[in-house]
């Protein structure tokens, strides 16, 4: 039995590749939660492409649940390049706010992408979620939903498994006090993944325009929520695309000075909440995915480029590539 969290995309708003973001990573939102033999994915930003490549290397045809916080494009845009979509035998349940099926289908269709979502060989299902829902999943997993504060709406999620829990609260803006719904959702959790896109000066407009009403928060407000909810560890997430590695390290240091153990999420980083050997205190352990990607096998590379070939219009129509509805 393993309960772990791996970050595949930690950037907010838009992907930010380049030499100033290589340490933290530039891919947009995607988090993998492993509960025993079940895989739950939180959002499908550009980071999900790397996760798909890993599944391809492992030759897995997993049963996946993808939970969407909301339907803004930086949280959807990696899905067309997610290898398991193109592998027969994969089962994916897409869960999220009202309109989830329409939003994903619109993204994968004319004029934006040459392969329709309805044509991929993976078996797909869709389920709309809402505020206050508590959803059991096979294997003793429970997902709890709460509506948080973001333009157009956003859902926060709590995943409980084996006596431990992780809370995903991205793209949410604080109030004058910690959001009562989020405090309730995160009560006693092992790990709180929190939108910390800005520092206090940025949010207040002392460094650039004021960000009030933009639907994002700060590391200091993350500390307030974590304290109010008595969570074990705070993870700073959804880094601003203008923030360099140095800036993220600075915010991490400041958060840790207020709440020891707080850390900034980085691509490839894994947090183990529980293992079969012991249900230990959550500890963040960095794991380098660059080496795994560099040593990708030929067969995995072939699978991993299916979506790229489709995007480039290669190999003919969807029908000629054998992409048929499940």
Image (cartoon, helix red, strand yellow):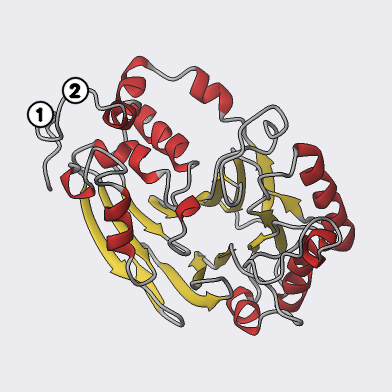
- Asked if residue 175 is positioned above or below residue 172 in the image, the reply reads below
Distance, label 2 to label 1, CA atoms, is 7 Å
- Asked if residue 147 is positioned above or below residue 204 in the image, the reply reads below
- Asked if residue 161 is positioned above or below residue 235 in the image, the reply reads below
- Asked if residue 123 is positioned above or below residue 314 in the image, the reply reads below
Pick the residue in front: 91 or 161: 91
Residue 193 is drawn in which quadrant? bottom right
Is the residue marked by circle 2 packed among few (<14), some (14-19), or many (20+) residues within 10 Å? few
Q: Residue at x 27, y 30 (%)?
A: 310
The image shows residue 125 at horizontal and vertical percentages of 23, 59
> Sequence order check: which comes first, mark 2 or mark 1?
2
User: At numbered mark 1, what does the secondary structure look like: helix, strand or loop?
Assistant: loop
Residue 48 in sight here: yes
Q: Residue at x 12, y 47 (%)?
A: 325
The image shows residue 19 at horizontal and vertical percentages of 70, 27
Q: Is residue 133 left or right of residue 326?
A: right
Residue 189 is drawn in which quadrant? bottom right
**Residue receiving disc 2:** 315
Residue 1 in sight here: no
Question: What is the number of callouts on the image?
Answer: 2
Q: Residue at x 63, y 37 (%)?
A: 25
Q: Is residue 226 left or right of residue 8?
A: right
Is the residue marked by circle 1 packed among few (<14), some (14-19), or many (20+) residues within 10 Å? few
The image shows residue 311 at horizontal and vertical percentages of 31, 32
Pick the residue in front: 237 or 134: 237
User: At numbered mark 2, what does the secondary structure look like: helix, strand or loop?
Assistant: loop
Most extreme residue toward the right is 257
Pick the residue in front: 268 or 283: 268
Give yes or no for contact between labels 2 and 1 (Cβ–Cβ under 8 Å): yes
**Residue receiving disc 1:** 320
Q: Is residue 218 left or right of residue 67?
A: right
The image shows residue 86 at horizontal and vertical percentages of 24, 37
């Amino acid at each position: 039995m393993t309960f772990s969290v791996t970050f595949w995309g930690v950037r907010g708003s838009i992907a930010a590749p380049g030499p100033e973001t290589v340490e933290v990573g530039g891919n947009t939102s995607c988090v993998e939660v492993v509960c025993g033999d079940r895989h739950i994915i939180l959002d499908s930003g550009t980071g999900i492409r790397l996760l798909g490549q890993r599944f391809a290397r492992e030759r897995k045809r997993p049963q996946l649940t993808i939970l969407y916080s909301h339907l803004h494009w930086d949280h959807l845009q990696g899905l067309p390049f997610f290898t398991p979509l193109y592998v027969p035998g994969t089962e994916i349940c897409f869960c999220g706010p009202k309109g989830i099926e329409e939003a994903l289908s619109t993204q994968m269709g004319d004029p934006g992408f040459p392969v329709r979502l309805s044509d991929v060989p993976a078996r797909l299902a869709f389920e709309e979620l809402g505020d206050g829902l508590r959803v059991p999943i096979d294997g003793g997993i429970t997902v709890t939903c709460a509506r948080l504060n973001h333009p157009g709406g956003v859902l926060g999620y709590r995943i409980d498994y084996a006596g431990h829990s992780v809370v995903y609260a991205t793209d949410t803006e604080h109030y004058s006090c910690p959001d009562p719904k989020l405090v309730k959702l995160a009560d006693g959790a092992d790990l709180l993944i929190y939108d910390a896109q800005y520092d206090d000066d940025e949010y207040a407009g002392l460094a650039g325009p004021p960000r009030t009403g933009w639907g994002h928060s700060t590391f200091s407000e993350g500390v307030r929520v974590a304290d109010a909810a008595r969570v074990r560890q705070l993870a700073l997430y959804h880094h601003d695309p203008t923030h360099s590695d140095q800036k993220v390290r600075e915010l991490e240091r400041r958060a840790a000075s207020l709440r020891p153990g707080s850390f900034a999420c980085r691509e490839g980083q894994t947090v183990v909440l529980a293992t079969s050997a012991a249900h230990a205190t959550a500890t963040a352990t960095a794991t380098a995915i660059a080496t795994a990607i560099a040593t990708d096998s030929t067969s995995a590379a072939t699978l991993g480029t299916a979506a790229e070939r489709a995007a480039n219009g290669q190999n003919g129509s969807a029908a000629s590539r054998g992409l048929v509805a499940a």
